[in-house]
Amino acid sequence: MAIKKTKGDLLDVMSLQEQIDQVVFDYFDTSVRHEIAHEQLMKLFTEVRTYFTDYLAKNDGVLPAASTYWHMFISCASQLSYFLAITTLTTAKQPQDTALALEYATLAVQTLPHLKTEDDELMVEEMKQQFTVLIEDKDKKEQLVGALTNERNDVGTSMRLLADYMAQHTVI
């Protein structure tokens, strides 16, 4: 289930989006098998993390300029973080699992770029609903839901926040 690369050695974000959609359809929508979903999403997230950190290393830490490609890339990274938050929350066995899920949720909110599309608004509403139901910490819940409503970032800021997260979390 490796993500393809394009001729220019870019990650094929269309393939990535299709793989995310397939996992969500198979293990969220048609059956609730979050353990399997988590495993597959983690593989994709690891590939995204490796690709992005390698990209930054090759470019001396300089973030790419915002473009359609990077917009799609950061949207996929945000979706992966969101679905990992959900699968981690629903399968949590230890307190540190819940803490990790909240990190994923925070990353998902911080990196979801501000768009004015119907799909974007549907994603925001889904995130609000799921976080409201699954996050027990009232302050954290209010913080995340409030940020989705009020503090959406542009693509450049979202990429910077993803880069910061990747630098702080080399192993997840």
Image (cartoon, helix red, strand yellow):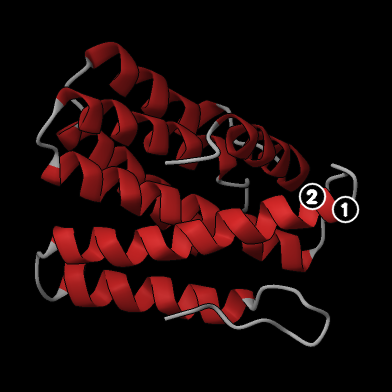
Q: Estimate how packed mark 1 is, as few (under 14), some (14 to 19) or many (20 or more) residues with alpha carbons within 10 Å.
A: few
In the image, what residue type sits under mark 1? Ala
* Residue under the point 30% across and 12% down: 139
Q: Is residue 23 left or right of residue 10?
A: left
Which mark is drawn over residue 128? none
* Residue under the point 41% across and 81% down: 1
Q: Position of residue 93 (x, y in %)?
A: 9, 36
Q: Position of residue 95 (x, y in %)?
A: 17, 23
Would you identify the image quadrant in which residue 72 lies?
A: bottom right
Name the mark nearer the viewer: 2 or 1: 2
Question: Residue under circle 2?
Answer: 56
Q: Estimate how packed mark 2 is, as few (under 14), some (14 to 19) or many (20 or more) residues with alpha carbons within 10 Å.
A: some
Q: CA distance from mark 2 to mark 1?
A: 12 Å
State yes or no: discs 2 and 1 in contact (Cβ < 8 Å). Answer: no
Instruction: Pick the residue in front: 150 or 134.
Output: 134
Q: Secondary structure at mark 2?
A: helix
* Residue under the point 11% across and 65% down: 33
From where the camera sits, is residue 165 visible?
A: yes
Q: Position of residue 78 (x, y in %)?
A: 51, 50
In the image, what residue type sits under mark 2? Leu
Q: Secondary structure at mark 1?
A: loop
Above or below, 38 against 36 in this view is above
Above or below, 18 against 127 in this view is below
Q: Is residue 141 left or right of residue 95?
A: right
From where the camera sits, is residue 117 visible?
A: no
Q: Position of residue 143 (x, y in %)?
A: 40, 19
Mark 1 or mark 2, which is nearer the start of the sequence? 2
User: What quarter of the picture does the C terminus occupy?
Assistant: top left
Would you identify the image quadrant in which residue 39 lies?
A: bottom left
Which mark is drawn over residue 65? 1
Above or below, 57 against 51 in this view is above
